[in-house]
């Protein structure tokens, strides 16, 4: 069945460092891909999404490109801030429109 | 806008008792709500999809008699864990999808409920 694999955390970075969180997927058909973020004590929020190959989703300085050839959707940000500390979830929307999540990656940004 | 609340945020109960968790969409109507379960350091696993006024659709392997879901109104869905046992201890998260005519519109997530069964 469809699945999502993302890198284990925690990822610890200094403020203004470059961020990459890897995400790969296995799916039949052509899923939509998502990144969700969960700040401490809050629910998951949609960060960005891409619905077809080569689409780039972007929001709040974060970007991810839907790479069909490598079945990847890596999350990147050029300069992280302390306020970006959170848990990030990669997810795919399968053919029945359900969300399948990766295990989450905790990001800790130090001042 | 688009806030989803869950109540309670955490609950501890004795083995054999039943626990009800509420999920409310505070500022929008949700025709569809989803219930997820999350184990430590693991993915969110979809348990069931509920549509207002109809029976919930459960994922394979989820016991529908143990996890009772009711979606009685466009703003409220409840998950009842019946005869809870320690293996039911987990983090339960709900999400709500507003009706906008798009099958794959954004889901808005609640903050989750941590259930501990002693």
Image (tube, coloured by chain):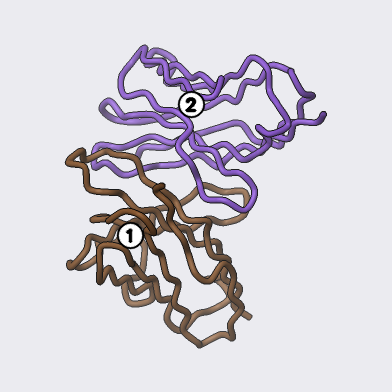
Is B59 left or right of A36, judged from the image as shown? left
**Image vertical order of residue A69 relative to residue A24, above or below:** above
Q: Give the x, y percent position of residue B48.
A: 33, 59
Is B76 left or right of B57, judged from the image as shown? right
**Image vertical order of residue A54 relative to residue A49, above or below:** above
Disc 1 target residue = B48
The image quadrant where one finds the C terminus of chain A is: top right
For this orientation, the residue located farthest to the right is: A111
Q: Give the x, y percent position of residue A3.
A: 42, 37
Who is closer to the viewer here, B82 or A61? A61
Quarter where residue B10 is shown = bottom right
Q: Residue at x 25, y 27 (%)?
A: A29
**Image vertical order of residue B14 relative to residue A66, above or below:** below
Mark number for residue A24? 2
Q: Give the x, y percent position of residue A86.
A: 64, 39
What is the crowding at mark 2: few (fewer than 14 residues within 10 Å), some, or many (at least 20)? many
Q: Chain of mark 2?
A: A
Colour brown belongs to chain? B
Hue of chain A? purple
Q: Give the x, y percent position of residue A32.
A: 33, 29
Q: Residue at x 48, y 32 (%)?
A: A47
Give the distance between the C-alpha atoms of the residues marked 2 and 1, in whole angstroms.
25 Å
Quarter where residue A53 is shown = top left
Kindly state the secondary structure of the residue where label 1 is placed.
Answer: strand
Quarter where residue B58 is shown = bottom left
Kindly state the secondary structure of the residue where label 2 is placed.
Answer: strand
Asked if the residue under mark 1 is in contact with the one under mark 2, i.e. CB atoms within 8 Å, the reply is: no
Mark number for residue A28? none
The image quadrant where one finds the N terminus of chain A is: top left
**Mark 2 or 1, which is nearer the eye?**
1
**Image vertical order of residue B114 relative to residue B41, above or below:** below
């Amino acid at each position: 069945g469809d699945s999502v694999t993302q890198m284990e955390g925690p990822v610890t970075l200094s403020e203004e460092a470059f961020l990459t969180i890897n995400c790969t997927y296995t799916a039949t058909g052509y899923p939509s891909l998502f990144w969700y973020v969960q700040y401490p004590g809050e629910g998951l929020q949609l960060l960005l999404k891409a619905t077809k190959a080569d689409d780039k989703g972007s929001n709040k300085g974060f970007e991810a490109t839907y790479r069909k050839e490598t079945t990847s959707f890596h999350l990147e940000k050029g300069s992280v801030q302390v306020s970006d500390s959170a848990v990030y979830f990669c997810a795919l929307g399968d053919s029945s429109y359900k969300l399948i999540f990766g295990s989450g990656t905790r990001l800790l940004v130090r001042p | 806008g688009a806030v989803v609340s869950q109540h309670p945020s955490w609950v501890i109960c004795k083995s054999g008792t039943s626990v009800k968790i509420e999920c409310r969409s505070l500022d929008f109507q949700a025709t569809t709500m989803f219930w997820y379960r999350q184990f430590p350091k693991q993915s969110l696993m979809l348990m069931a999809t509920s549509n207002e006024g109809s029976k919930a659709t459960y994922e394979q392997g989820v016991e529908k008699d143990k996890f009772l879901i009711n979606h009685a109104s466009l703003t409220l869905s409840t998950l009842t864990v019946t005869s809870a046992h320690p293996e039911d201890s987990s983090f339960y998260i709900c999400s709500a999808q507003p009706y906008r005519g798009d099958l794959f519109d954004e889901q808005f997530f609640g903050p989750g409920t941590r259930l501990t069964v002693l």
